[in-house]
Amino acid sequence: QVQLVESGGGLVQAGASLRLSCAASGRTFTRYTMGWFRQAPGKEREFVAAITWSGGSTYYVDSLKGRFAISRDNAKNTVALQMNSLKPEDTAVYYCAADVSARGLVRGDVEYWGQGTQVTVSS
């Protein structure tokens, strides 16, 4: 079993940056792909970004390419999401996710979820 805990959310103005972090504990010796999803009020949870265990492959939703960047530190069992040039439409609860399959995680077939952290971007 893996436990995921997000941090770093908050309230920022449009154009600002935030860095989210997710700390994993438990069966972290498994080579999980890690990623981020988000869910805005009244909308479905959507995929944001993912990174394989080695860091060799990253995945982003097309609409966020160039603004968001995902990274991981396996020695610390953490994954981060750097969010730049934030827009009000980025307002959502952001969830950390882990799964053994990169393709599965991107589809939303996620084995482990974090509790979420709120990101609010004002105009």
Image: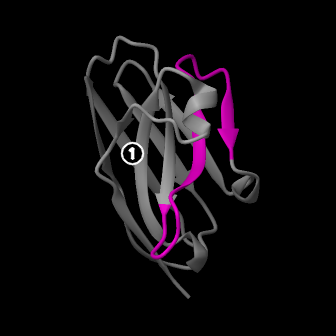
Q: Which residues are magenta?
A: 39-60
Local SS, label 1:
strand
Q: Is residue 60 left or right of residue 17?
A: right
In this rendering, does residue 15 appear at all?
no
Q: Residue at x 33, y 55 (%)?
A: 116
Above or below, 118 relative to 66: below
Does 53 appear in magenta? yes
Give the quadrant of the N terminus: top left
Q: Residues within 10 Å of mark 1 (few under 14, many from 20)?
A: many
Give the quadrant of the C terminus: bottom right
Q: Residue at x 28, y 17 (%)?
A: 27
Q: Residue at x 74, y 53 (%)?
A: 66
The x, y position of residue 29, in whole percent, is 35, 11
Q: Is residue 24 left or right of residue 50?
A: left
Does 80 appear in magenta? no
Q: Residue at x 59, y 70 (%)?
A: 86
In this rendering, does residue 54 appear at all?
yes
In front of the other: 12 or 108: 108
Q: Is residue 101 left or right of residue 41?
A: right
Q: Which residue is mark 1?
A: 21
The x, y position of residue 14, in whole percent, is 57, 79
